[in-house]
Image (cartoon, rainbow, N blue to C red):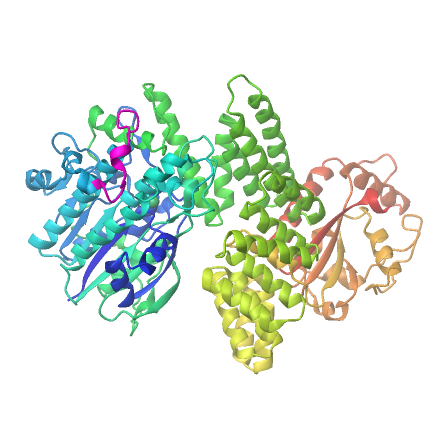
Amino acid sequence: MAKVLLIGWDAADWKVINKLIDKGLMPALEGLINHGCMGKLSTLEPPMSPILWTSIATGKLADKHGILGFIEPGPSGVRPTTSGSRKTKAIWNILTQLGYKTHVVGWWPSHPAEAVNGIMVSNFYHSSQNGTLQEGTVYPSNLSGLFEHLRVHPDEITEQHLLPFVPDGALVDQKNDRRLQTIARLLAEASSIQSAATWIMDHAEWDFMGVYFNAIDMFSHHFMCFHPPKMQQVSDSDYKLYNEVVTSAYRYHDMMLEAMLSRVDKDTTVILMSDHGFLSDHLRPAYLPDEPANPVIQHSEHGILVIKGPGIKKDELIYGASLLNITPTILSLFGQPSAKDMDGVPLIQIFEAPQISEMIDSWDLVDGEYSMRASSLPLTNEENQQALKQLVELGYIEDPGSDSEKAVQMAKNEANYHLARVYMSSNRHALAIPLLEELNNQMSDEGRFVTRLARCYMEMGSYTLAQSALELFEERASISCNKPGAKTKHYIYWLQQADVVKGDLLLMQGRAKEALLLFEKVQKINPKSVGMLLKLGNTTMDLGLYDKAHNYFMEVLTQNPESDQAYAGLAFIAIQGGSNEEAAGFALDAIGLNFNAPISHFYLAKALFGMKNYKNAAEALEVCLKMHPNFGLARNMLVEVYTFLGMDQKIAEHNNFFAKAKEDNYGQYQADILEHSVYYTKNLKLNNPMVVVSGLPRSGTSVMMQMLLNGGLPVFTDNLRVSDESNPRGYYEHEAVKSIASNNKWMTQAQGQAVKIIAQLLPYIPPRFSYRVIFMERTMDEVIASQHKMLVRGGKHRENFYPGGLDIIFRKQLQLTKKWIKEQPNIDVLYVNYEEVK
Ligand SMILES: [Zn+2]
């Protein structure tokens, strides 16, 4: 029968581990890797441990599981987040319900312990080293005394234990430098978890054993700044004393792993994983903004994953895994179905003989004895204080102080902020907006709220709202910045971030040149910022400055050799230069580093297509579209590839997708799952695009058509509407355009020509073509006045009749059309002001 040992190492990172394994310093983990498969594990937003470990244990995002931060409102003030706040069954509830012997040690958050079919030791076990265990720490409670006894006290950690961490420990001035005590405490906490877990493995029957260690995260937050190479702001003496702490912590965990592995048989599947990584090299941030939970800026986006067991592939790399896959995969290991309400699916690629079982709707709907607590046990105030103190010390939360009302409000605000980030990361920007607006109203000089709010507006196509939110922030922040005692560095940091968002806003509006100026300004202040270098690379690429873009991407790779986005950029440039083989190589590099970016698969397909390798191009496109179904360019290309391959059924299948999408209404299109791919897509040289001139009637569309004609571009017109006083140079329209909503067959004839389609009709253009839209903008009053004048001339309006309310309707229509344009990957848009061309 299947057995599963799940070990969590918070913040464990491959970069640190790989170096240690190369030196033979983590033999237990090395053995595990050699006999199983390994990979990177994508983390989730926001990367905060209690939220992440609950997603790991439920297979669900935080809006479904309900754990939204480190603290939550309690009966008197705030308290550390409790297990009772989880809204859905965790893996241990499901396995308990199915009758498996289930044990859990130290999971965050799991206090008070739940009545599993086995033993549960909560996350309060190790965090309260003094006195007796708090009520609710151990289930069943009659084992409390035993587990209390198994704990390791920091006093039991001797010089011998500390020496490997700080060889020159004797030199530490212990009166003024408490860091040796910190190491002793973290070691004691990790050892307590180990001792509870191994006791259970030795003394109880088990089918599932989940053990969570937070020590690597804690060690990293306290000591990663001393890790080699030496950071500039670290003193020589501190560096000399503490540069081995992090590697020693990893080695200590390897020893604990070895002890656990010696207790499992060959029928047991072992899963070792982390919830995110931790920046360990020159990418470590030199500055942390002064705000709650700022330490998470040190986290990196990929954790580790190793799986070894019967029926699991050996010596294989796992691609594309995320935290959400863990619970569904454990269910598969037990031969149990996953559920449709989970956000993740089983990692079937790890099995030698994968068995795909039918999913059930939800494990929450399956009745049975599953032990979730209906409500949580209130903590005493003293217990609260102790647990909160640690979170404050780590910088994860602000000191709630003695004003409990204020503290509760603060906890609610943080929870809403985190929920907004969950929505943003899963493309539900509309749901994030009200939460962020509320926060931004309360704290209008807080950069973290307004920059995210502006991004949400942007995603919804409301560029003006985004722009004004950022401008208001700049005003407020500049005032706050000059107040006596202000956190100037903090404001400067966020003003820069606001500039970055403004640049992105310009990019989305097709104003890449202006965006470039802004990005260059920000980059001057942080010349080595990988994020800025990437933006510069993408923007110069957008402008067709491929040599510059190439240099930026190469610079990114010297800073961070694992930047998949830089490789994707290089792939694109190679495609533009006609070097398909080179492009395929770069795209494969990008995919190897991050499987989950659809754009890399698309570039691979483009390169393969160029090499006439249609079969593999089709495969790459299928992968791409699975991740990003609304990637129109990719689907167009796939139809083309299947045409070459003569696969009619596939062609029909994909064309049906378009037909269906049209029925579902384009406005419903979900935006991209990756922030950057919108830009990437727009950067592509569109395949024989149709030029569409659009805008409200009387906003300069005819003038633009004439300019294009003069520039040598054929225009699609039947010349039925002849020039008159209103448009002395002609209208350049085609009668067929008016009926585009019901009949668009004529579009094929318009390819390679310029067509005039007014803004209100634009959403009817069929998705099977690529378009370059020139969108004319003119002030609303002028548009309406000009339309009125024309209608008067044509005898359709009386001179003194003025239609009221039209401006509101037009504004709304424009807003909808612009939002729609933004969501179409096959449209490249350029907004042109009437004033510039008239
Ligand atoms: Zn973590």
Residue projecting furthest to the bottom: 646
- Percent coordinates x, y for residue 766 in the rendering: 65, 63
Task: Please give the range of residues in magenta.
Answer: 162-178
Is residue 166 part of the magenta span, yes or no? yes
* Residue 338 visible, this angle: no
Say if 637 sits above or below 211 in the image: below
- Percent coordinates x, y for residue 427 in the rendering: 49, 49
In this orientation, which residue lies closer to the viewer: 354 or 181?
Answer: 181
Task: Indicate the quadrant containing the C terminus: top left, top right, bottom left or bottom right.
Answer: top right
Q: Quadrant of ligand 1?
A: top left
Is residue 541 part of the magenta span, yes or no? no
* 76 lies left or right of 427: left
* 193 lies left or right of 456: left
* Residue 446 visible, this angle: yes
In this orientation, which residue lies closer to the viewer: 617 or 496?
Answer: 496
The quarter of the displayed image where residue 744 is located: bottom right
Residue projecting furthest to the top: 484
- Percent coordinates x, y for residue 127 in the rendering: 22, 35
Which residue corresponds to the image point at 79% horizontal and 65% vertical from the top-left?
A: 753
In this orientation, which residue lies closer to the viewer: 734 or 131?
Answer: 131
The quarter of the displayed image where residue 260 is located: bottom left
- Percent coordinates x, y for residue 132 in the rendering: 11, 31
Which residue corresponds to the image point at 32% horizontal and 44% vertical from the top-left?
A: 244
Q: Count every numbered label the image shows and give the total.
A: 0
The majority secondary structure of the magenta stretch comes to loop
Which residue corresponds to the image point at 38% horizontal and 39% vertical from the top-left?
A: 239
* 668 lies left or right of 408: right
